[in-house]
């Protein structure tokens, strides 16, 4: 059990879903975001912070013994926005972690690190990144800084290449990529409990029928996802119909991210 867990990006979709379950992991939970959070519970504290503010991030890490880092830009956006949230923000977080007590970090990386692999390719955590967006590139940077800060400063990180973490899958692609918040929570629990994780990359998908990713190299975590997207298959296929196999968004793992507009226009 952690004493004080920091969760950045706590006002977002994943943070909001994880929040009620974090009591299982820590006595006190520090929630942080640049957006407001209401309903702060007795075991929680809220600290507003923009991740691009180095001093603010340094204050956040005070007395923290574990971090779930969700904060940042979570989709394709213009370069400057991504740099502030996901590049400067990651640097600030790891520098603050280094200056304080070097807590273990769960980093919300993304499947968009490997979005330009085809869906018929099965990937392990050693494949060369093939990002499908500037957003995906920023997550490659995030994983790289996590690797550097382990090798140089001993800060351990689990980089989770999250598939699609929503209440339920929204389209046929997400039947393969869906991750329940309950499975995300159990993955975080395994990562905090493991004796040693170094810097490990793991794919975050539930126990779905269709699997694109091989977590064999992270088997030491003992993570067993329990949920499955299968219960929604019929409903999704009935409402959206089959996918066009010639569409790049169907061919590649990153879906619509592979053929999105130029980010400067977003
Ligand atoms: P979200 O967009 O709902 O939440 C992100 C939160 O970060 C927001 O509350 C936003 O206010 C905050 N934020 C953005 N820039 C910030 C900054 N500069 N300083 C402080 N806070 C900032 O995203 P979601 O879906 O909750 O995802 C959480 C994390 O997981 C993100 O890092 C995302 O890239 C990653 N992820 C999510 C996936 C999903 O399926 N939901 C899939 C893959 C990765
Ligand atoms: C992500 O990385 C995004 O944060 C999320 O909004 C979804 O687009 C998800 O990937 C996905 O690929 O479904």
Image: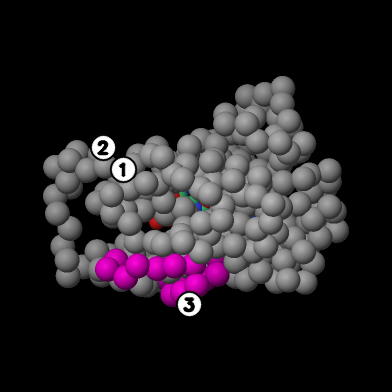
Residue 128: assigned label = 3
Identify the magenta region: 119-140
Left-right relation of 120 to 161:
left
Q: Which residue is mark 1?
A: 229
Left-right relation of 68 to 152:
left
Q: Is residue 93 above or below residue 231?
A: below
Residues at discs 2 and 1 in contact (Cβ within 8 Å):
yes
Left-right relation of 219 to 236:
right
Q: Horizontal and vertical percent for residue 203?
A: 47, 58
Residues at discs 3 and 2 in contact (Cβ within 8 Å):
no
Q: Horizontal and vertical percent for residue 209?
A: 28, 49
Q: Which residue is mark 2?
A: 231
Residue at (14% x, 54% y) in the render: 242
* Front in this rendered view, residue 41 or 147: 147
Classify 10 Å Cα crowding around label 3: few (below 14), some (14-19), many (20 and above).
few
- Tell me if residue 134 is in the magenta stretch: yes
Q: Quadrant of residue 112?
A: bottom left
Residues at discs 1 and 3 in contact (Cβ within 8 Å):
no
Local secondary structure at mark 1: helix
State which tag comes first along the sequence, 3 or 2. 3
Q: Residue furthest bottom?
A: 128
Q: Horizontal and vertical percent for residue 119?
A: 29, 66
């Amino acid at each position: 059990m952690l004493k004080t867990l920091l969760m950045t990006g706590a006002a977002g979709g994943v943070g909001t879903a994880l929040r009620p379950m974090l009591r299982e992991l820590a006595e006190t939970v520090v929630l942080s975001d640049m957006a407001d959070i209401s309903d702060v519970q007795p075991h929680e504290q809220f600290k507003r912070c923009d991740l691009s503010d180095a001093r603010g991030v340094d204050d956040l890490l005070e007395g923290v013994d574990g971090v779930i880092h969700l904060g940042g830009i979570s989709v394709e956006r213009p370069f400057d926005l991504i740099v502030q949230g996901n590049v400067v923000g990651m640097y600030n977080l790891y520098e603050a972690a280094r200056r304080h007590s070097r807590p273990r970090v769960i980093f919300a990386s993304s499947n968009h690190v490997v979005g330009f692999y085809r869906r018929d390719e099965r990937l392990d955590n050693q494949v060369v990144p093939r990002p499908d967006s500037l957003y995906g590139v920023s997550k490659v940077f995030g994983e790289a800084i996590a690797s550097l800060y382990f090798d140089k400063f001993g800060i351990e990180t689990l980089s989770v290449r999250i598939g699609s973490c929503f209440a339920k899958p929204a389209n046929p692609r997400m039947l393969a990529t869906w991750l329940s918040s309950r499975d995300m929570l159990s993955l975080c629990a395994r990562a905090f409990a493991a004796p040693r994780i170094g810097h490990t990359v793991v794919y975050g998908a539930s126990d779905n029928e269709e699997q694109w990713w091989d977590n064999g190299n992270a088997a030491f975590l003992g993570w067993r996802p329990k949920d499955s997207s299968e219960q929604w298959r019929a409903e999704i296929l009935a409402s959206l119909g089959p996918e066009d196999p010639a569409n790049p968004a169907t061919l590649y793992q990153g879906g619509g991210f592979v053929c999105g507009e130029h980010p400067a226009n977003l």
